[in-house]
Amino acid sequence: MATLQNNAYLREENLLSLFSLNRLIVPEIQREYVWGNNTDVLTQFLNDIRAKAEPCSVCHHVHAAKSMNVGFLYSYKPNYVKRSYERILDEYLIDGQQRITTLFLLLLYRASVEDRLSDFLAIIRAYDGPSTIAFNYKVRNLTQRFVLDLISWTEKMGKKAFDFVDSMDDTPSWMLDDYLTDPTVMAMISAIKVMRDVFKDDDNYYFDFLLTNIRFWHFKTEATSQGEELYITMNLRGEQLSDNEMTKARALPQDELINHGMDWESWQTFFWRNRKKSVENPNADKGFNAFLACIEGYVSFFKGKAYKANIFDITSAMWALQYVTGNDVKDGNGNTVFSNNFRKELETKYNGLYTTWYDNFLNDIWTIIDKDSIDWHIDNYKLSKDAEARTLYNNSSVARNASMLIWPWLYYFSTLAPSQQPDDDVLIHLLHLYYVRFHCYQRSSTTIERVVDNIVKYYRDNDSIDNSEAGDDDADIDDFDHLFSEEEMLLFKLCGKDRTAESIAWKLQDLPYFIGERKLGGYTIRNFIRKEVGIIDWAKPTESLTALYDFINTLLPDGNADGGNIPVKEALLFYTKGSESEFWRRIGPGYYYVYETCKWKRIVRASWFLIFYREYNSFCQKHLAHDGNPVVSTDNIMHSFLEEKRQTFFRQEQESNNVNIAEWSHRNLCILYDALCPQGIWGNDYPHIVFYEEDNPSPSKDALYHGQNGKRGKPYWADRIDLPGDWEEQLAKKYQFNEQD
């Protein structure tokens, strides 16, 4: 510690030395004081101080010499300061205003409560005049005037000075109307109110502890240009919270504090520049705190619950994040460790091909990080061998799903030697595989290391994949029988070998019909690429995958919108398979029947959809070419297909004597109504089908309605659908179908 204490730029200082040796000035363009408006943060900060102090239960004074370091304080000497021989010089705050302002107000409040006001006034040099006060808003006149008025009022009123904060309807005469419009002033008043609430009925003495045992690492940049540049960068980040500062204080090694402190500031700047510019995340700290929590969760999961992330874990993770997101990775001295080549390499390797998933992946990362709401501490039951840990693991589904997006590449970078360039082919495959897993709600955190090691080995040695079972425990919890799914194994043969085919597979997987959705087995296009299906010719994967993509886009032109693709839904009425009796899903209550028919992510991946796809594809191939010329236009091809299915259906019903319509199933009735009702049974505003029981049914036991979504997406019936009055005649005429009682 001696080298640090003797360093002219960095010292560990308590509040007494900070106020005695410096005139700390909040710059005019500095952000407002906001901690007073964040009750949770401020309350936690104050309670941490009380807990650390541990006053004596007999005399109520703090005896133990316990210090509490609250992070870094950055300042610079303004350019008008020339006389370096003066004892007290102006120091403009770069970062630390929130904590310093809070502690200044707390000292003032405790001084009034503990009859130490004269000591407080002497320490801050209040007797020397307003311009010399140790913590100064002199370039922000209104705020500075409020602070001086508050100090004078406290000197006059003593312990009762702060009673006015409880009701702003009865303010002292010195309280100007302008004060009530100043955000910093109002936040100060709110902060004092929180302090009174936290220390209510607390008869202990904290003033000396605050003065001598609360410590900062005070970094003086000294060089004006450097200081102002650092100020501008850090000021833009927004109000500072305590989370990352506390992690910083714990994680930074004391013998490398300056270098790693510079790293830390570069990371905060990185999060500022890459944050989602929204109301939810107006500053850098939210994202930085969230990522630090992610790192802590990651290292404790893989190294043991007691393990805390150190600076080397954090450095590796930050390098990984910067590299993966396509940013230059720099050290604290501004030297480039990794160049910004990942995005460039991706675009070069797949020149002109589909790589949009990477942008979606980046958006997913920042969405997760900017949320700052995930509890990343997942107990690894395989390390602990603990039944309770297994339960906690099982209950951490949100965090485990989020881990799919981030932890695999954190682990990959942790395996690299210092400054070793990652293998971009490995990284591309790794990121895409887990991008798909994340969107398919896979949650097998315990398999990450083995999966990553296998991918590295595959590319390094051109070796086969070990797809042994992931383990009974994983299978139990994650429905994950092997390390890699059947779909992933099929697509392995494309990775890095046929980039055109690989990019088309990515493009297919990113269609709204395939990417995402829960409880669908964790796959996207598996049903279409399985060898036994025969849709893909793996000797010519590019041509086959392109044809599949084009046909899916032609078949389903309306995206994944509810109510879209009505002709396809009409065709799907004719397909059933095993337990999947119909393509719809019952979602209504017992007294009426609501069938959801618009969840295309579910529909497209069902086995009966594949049967329909193959039949319709063959129908198109048969009817679209005759001597090289189409004989059925593409506009009418689905209509022709539907009419053929209807003709076959009604003929079969006639031949089987299954003609009592009143006893028909809902599926059969839908086919009947859809064939004969001019308005059909669907519309873009009516994505569902609803049957409702009536007393006097005609022709069936149920009435058929258009179904639509109401409040909160709950389905209900809307317009009733009626068969035409001459429906029997129309049916007999169109399909040679005669009703029999």
Image (cartoon, grey):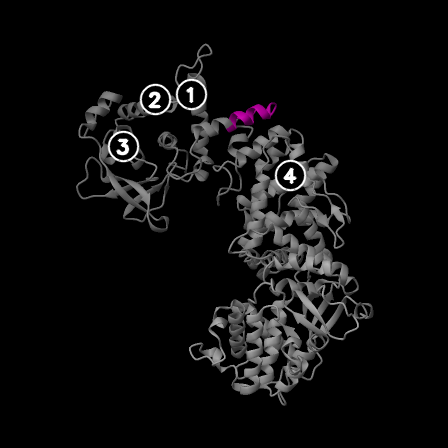
* Residue 429 - label: 4
**Above/below status of 320 relative to 174:** above
Q: Secondary structure at mark 3?
A: loop
Question: How many residues crowd around disc 1 within 10 Å: few (fewer than 14), some, or many (20 or more)?
Answer: some
Residue at image mark 2? 644
Which comes sooner in the sequence, label 3 or label 4? 4
Residue 119 falls within the magenta-colored stretch: no
Q: Is residue 677 left or right of residue 114?
A: left
Q: Residue at x 60, y 28 (%)?
A: 501
At label 2, the amino acid type is Glu
- Magenta residue span: 535-549
- Cα separation, mark 4 vs mark 2, equals 45 Å
**Above/below status of 575 relative to 690:** above
**Above/below status of 371 relative to 651:** below
- Cα separation, mark 3 vs mark 2, equals 20 Å
Q: In front: mark 3 or mark 2?
A: 3
Q: Are marks 2 and 1 in contact (CB under 8 Å)?
A: yes
At label 4, the amino acid type is His
Q: Secondary structure at mark 2?
A: helix
* Residue 722 - label: none
Residue 538 falls within the magenta-colored stretch: yes
State the residue lying farthest toward the top. 627
Q: Residue at x 71, y 60 (%)?
A: 227
At label 1, the amino acid type is Phe
Residue at image mark 1? 619
Give the dominant element type of the magenta stretch: helix, strand or loop. helix
Q: In front: mark 1 or mark 4?
A: 4
